[in-house]
Amino acid sequence: MAELKGIDIHVHPQTEEVIKAAGERGAQMARYFGRGERKPVSFAEMADRYRDLGLMCCLMNSTDITVTGQIPVPNDHLAQAQKDHPDVFIAFAVIDPWMGRAAIDEVKRCHEELGVRGIGELNPGRQKFHPNDPRFFPIWEECAKRDLIMLFHTGMMGAGAGTPGGLGFELQYTKPIPGLDSLAAAFPELKVIGAHPSWPWTAESLAICTHKMNYYVDLSGWAPKYFPDELVHYVNTRIQDRALFGSDWPMIDVERWLREFDELPIRPEVRQKIMLDNAKKLLGI
């Protein structure tokens, strides 16, 4: 890679193992996002694609094993990709907060043995938990102690979207206030990313980011041409140092995200921060 142009803070691998683990829910989400048939993409193929674009990316894992019983892809799967392609991939690990001590042990293992940089994507809607529930504080304490970034889904979610009853998933869990606001307040040393524009609570996420310096907003999961004016204004001004480029690939095609983001009225110096500088500082690159 000749020149690093950006860091996509939020991507979901689509290897055969990941697709198999996602099962029917993965197929349902693909239908909702209009992606059609899910075709496996190897880590080698994905790495070449991002190299060609001059990008690095953070790999997100997923689990809701306590709620659904679905066995997730091991965190080792993503860590191996980071080991094989360190110039492109930055691995995050995922845990199920309801697993208590086992979740803490997995945080330790993934940090010490696998070298992950963060925990994500945690999805309170699918995992059915409130991030500010004191029962989970020992997990967040462990993450804070290890300086691990924590990325949480916020707002509307694809899982269950367009189905009767939303597959039983509830959007109340994905509301940024009070969950993530209280979490960021309780652990000021913890770096918290609220993923996506958080619709229908975009203003809540922007308010947290304005109020708390340990809270970040990633711009993934939405095509930039649909970004509300309020979001564009805030990332261009008040939260320009804590807004992060993210595509949520394959939900949003990364080339499409880049093309549409280029068309937004973002100042050049701020665009540089969002695309690269903020993530480099956050990740310690």
Image: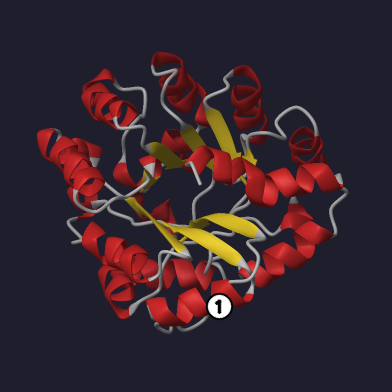
Q: Amino acid at mark 1?
A: Arg
User: Disc 1 designates what residue?
Assistant: 49
Residue occupying the point 51% across, 79% down: 48
Quarter holding residue 229: top right
The residue sitting at the top extreme is 186
- Relative horizontal placement of residue 123, taking residue 112 as reference (left or right): right
User: Can residue 266 be spotted in the picture?
Assistant: no
User: Can residue 178 be spotted in the picture?
Assistant: yes
**In the rendering, at what x and y percent does residue 168 appear?**
34, 49
**In the rendering, at what x and y percent does residue 110 appear?**
23, 48
Relative to 174, say whether 72 is above or below. below
Residue occupying the point 61% across, 27% down: 209
Q: Secondary structure at mark 1?
A: helix
Residue occupying the point 32% across, 65% down: 83
Quarter holding residue 6: bottom right
- Relative horizontal placement of residue 236, taking residue 279 as reference (left or right): right
Relative to 229, say whether 24 is above or below. below
**In the rendering, at what x and y percent does residue 22 appear?**
31, 67
